[in-house]
Amino acid sequence: MAGEIPDLIAEVRTGTGKGAARQARREQKVPGIVYGGGADPLPLNFDFNYLLKHLKAGRFLSTLWNLRVEGQDDVRVIARAVQRDVVKGLPTHVDLMRLRRTTRISLFINVEFINHDKCPGLKRGGTLTIVRPEVELSVIAADIPEKVTVDLEGLAIGETITISSVPLPDGVKPTIERDFVIANIVAPRAVTADADEDAAEAGAEPSHA
């Protein structure tokens, strides 16, 4: 289970319709709504600068949030849409969806690499090149893994770690069907350079007097 679900703070918006939304924007708020989960839709307002900060941080639409609204129970939500001004690109409305415990969603989960000291490739001077520090997985809202663990024990220089080689919890699966690369154990630069030199010499034409 994910250890930390970030908070998303909002307030109840009084009134609905275009008039209430325009009033919210005049007050430096961004109107929004949360729906689903077997409860009535609830109109919301977000502080403009607060919301913009979260949007600029990235992954807003693929992050599981703990929605906090004064006077309401906290609820897990995921953003379904962010409407923006066509000229300035600034947010003008946010749609959120409440999640049931059985809801399946796609989230980016961090990748953790362990047993560096038991990796022959690293001991021989190789470098761990991380292609994907996080992977997008299809998960159940009630059982979100905190991380994906990659065990480096026994891996040699030149080996590639793909998603199929990483054990995933039950019910968790990648959103991408192909067997994508997560990381590589690459040779030290000096070794690579020597190998390139040897290959070049082997393929060079003999010189003529």
Image: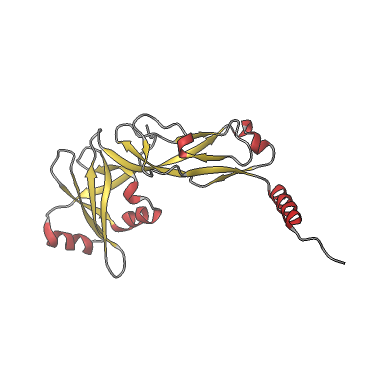
Between residues 116 and 3, which one lies in front from this camera angle?
A: 116
Residue drawn 74% across the image and 50% down it: 194
Residue drawn 64% across the image and 37% down it: 121
Q: Quadrant of residue 51?
A: bottom left
Q: Residue furthest bottom?
A: 87
Where, quadrant-wise, is the N terminus in this rendering?
top left
On screen, residue 89 versus residue 113, left or right, reads left
Between residues 137 and 196, which one lies in front from this camera angle?
A: 196
Residue 91 lies, in percent from the top left, at 28, 60
On screen, residue 202 versus residue 55, left or right, reads right
Image coloring type: secondary structure
Q: Quadrant of residue 206?
A: bottom right
Against 143, residue 56 (above or below) is below
Residue 60 lies, in percent from the top left, at 34, 50
Against 10, residue 73 (above or below) is above
Between residues 65 and 105, which one lies in front from this camera angle?
A: 105
